[in-house]
Amino acid sequence: MIPKFDWLHLPRSEIIKTLLLPSAIVFVSFFVVTLWAYAGASNYLRDTINSTSNRRIEVSRSAIQRQFATYEEILRGGVGLFKSSSNVDRDEWKMFVDNFAVENRYPGIDGIGYSKFLGASEKDTFVNEMRRDGAPGFRIYPTEQRDTYTTIVYLEPMNERNARALGYDMFTEKNRRAAMEYARDSGDLGVTETVTLVQEGEGSEEPGFLIYMPLYKNGMPTNTVEQRRRAIDGFIYMPLRAADIVEHMLPSDAQTEVGVQIFTDPTQADESFLYENGLFSQLANKESYSAQAEITLHNTIWHINYRFSHNIVPLAVRQRPASTILWGGMVSIFTALIVYRLLLNRSQKLAAANEKALQLAKDDLLSLASHQLRTPATGVKQYIGMVLEGYAGDLNDDQKRFLSKAYSSNERQLRIINDLLFVAKADEGRIVISKSPTNISVLVKETVNEQTASAKDKRHKLVAKVPRKAIWLDVDAHSLRMALENLLTNAIKYTKEGGKITVTAAENEKEVTISVEDSGIGIKREDMHMLFKQFSRIPNELSAETGGSGIGLYLAQHLVQLHRGTINVKSKAGQGSTFTIRLPKANGRRKSYLPQSPIKKKKI
Ligand code: ADP
């Protein structure tokens, strides 16, 4: 909890300067360091995400490239078979493909085939040959007339799906044609963009791609593009189902941590969509990191979108920025609070020490001044008294008038000096009271009567409310009268002309109360702490004109405390005040009391 500093009574600006500002500086300094650490932790997280995802991307990239190299080797094997044999028949091709056991070892490869290039003039002869050689229903499709034809001649393993593809002219479809032309012209492997495979039946169309290796006629030069175009005999090729192939290519973490989506042309998302694993869409709604990569596969580029599960980064690294800000914020607040607490302690000690030193200095000055003043002032009183009584001869009226004024001024002066001496005595604990049974009702009435004249001067209505029955209490009548007098003169002083002052005496089983209620200017809440202190005056609209030394309430309280009583006050600015003396009814009779904790001082 934030400790209270109210009692220091420091001005707001001082509290800001000595307590709040240093604490705020400490907080801000610590928080700036926290922000700096937060930025560091965030950078580290970003770097870790980047490096981890780049590593994963590299792993999948090289897995895909390795797989393509394997396919290339298989196709080159097919090319080798045709080169080494003058005529590769259906059985030989079947044996060659069976050797690879593609269905078991290469899931996703739909088959390995041979497609032949034919000029328009060669077409019919070739179709007849095929029909003769064990494929009676063979035809080249689409059937429209054109200058050149290609036709799938062999495609193993032979099954219903692949049988559907025999005779298909792949050159008639633009994506296949582009890959075949690239393979023919470059002598390199040609890869299609996304296609729908012809062997797929209606309704089961899934994206795939084909790869082609050119087969040139034996003995013809293949050094230039022109020579290669003339020498082309056909292609050894593979149709590949993307889903199976890519799943096979990706490292095992793709199942749990890496979502992948592949297009061959991102501007044609629908048409060129090749593959997406299940995790890719699952990760869309979860905390994940995304990245893009491109892999060049001969003439084609695969555009890959990655979504990495946040698990690729260790939990501690992921949480570091948030926990840095949390812990740093807490440390900043606690440190600022500790600094605040220490400064507050220091201020409290300083204030207490200052107050004590000031009090001692005041006391010294007070006792010195009052002693030095009393003797000469008393002398003045005596001599003026003697002159007024005619010891120095007769006086005319003016002389009498001036001397009377001097006499009453001197009396006021002596009263103040006596008050000062009384304070000095009170501080030293030298005031001793002597109690005797007193009728409090009478004491109150008499004290009120004495003040009637001054109340009248200010046109106040002064009322004493006392019960008919006598209130007997053991008190030092002189001291109690002094205390009540102080409260009453204050009520008269601090009430504007024409006010009302009511003095009430009452008793119950435990105590006797005397309260002085006025309709005066009241006391502000924030000034209350200044009451009952020595020489403490609260500046207000009446205090300048009334004059005073700020010791009335201090003395009143001191005298009441000697009776083991209390004085409390209820007041609101502008709405009057009520000062109440409470005197406990004593059980036994005691002659004299000492104050509870007198301030120890050297003798005057
Ligand atoms: P003094 O009257 O000489 O200033 P006191 O110790 O009697 O000294 O009073 C201290 C201050 O308390 C006064 O200056 C005055 O502002 C305030 N005070 C005391 N009594 C009243 C009252 N009845 N109504 C309003 N203010 C009061």
Image (spheres, rainbow, N blue to C red):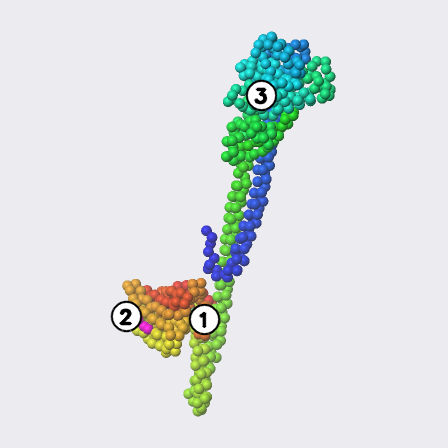
Any mark on residue 256, and which?
none
Q: In this rendering, does residue 23 appear at all?
A: yes
Name the amino acid, label 2. Pro
Of 433 and 330, the residue lying toward us: 330
Quadrant location of residue 57? top right
In the displayed structure image, the side of residue 232 where residue 460 appears, left or right: left
Label 1 environment density (alpha carbons within 10 Å; few <14, some 14–19, many ≥20):
few
Please indicate whether residue 407 sits to the left or right of residue 445 in the image.
Answer: right
Point out the tag, 3 or 2, that comes first from the N-terminus: 3
Whether ligand 1 has any atom under 8 Å from the Cβ at mark 1 is answered as no
Vertical position of residue 132 compared to residue 268: above or below? above
**Can residue 325 be found in the magenta stretch?**
no
Q: x, y percentage for residue 354?
A: 51, 62
Q: Give the spatial CA distance, label 3 vs label 2.
A: 117 Å
Q: Tell me which label, 2 or 1, sits earlier in the chain.
A: 2
Which residue is under mark 3? 240
Farthest residue toward the front?
145
From what the image shows, is residue 510 above or below residue 410? Answer: above
Looking at the rendered structure, the secondary structure element under dot 3 is: strand
Q: Name the residue under label 2.
A: 467
Q: What stretch is highlighted in magenta?
A: 463-468
- Residue at which label 1 appears: 541
x and y percentages locating residue 264 in the rendered image:
60, 28
Q: Quadrant of residue 111?
A: top right
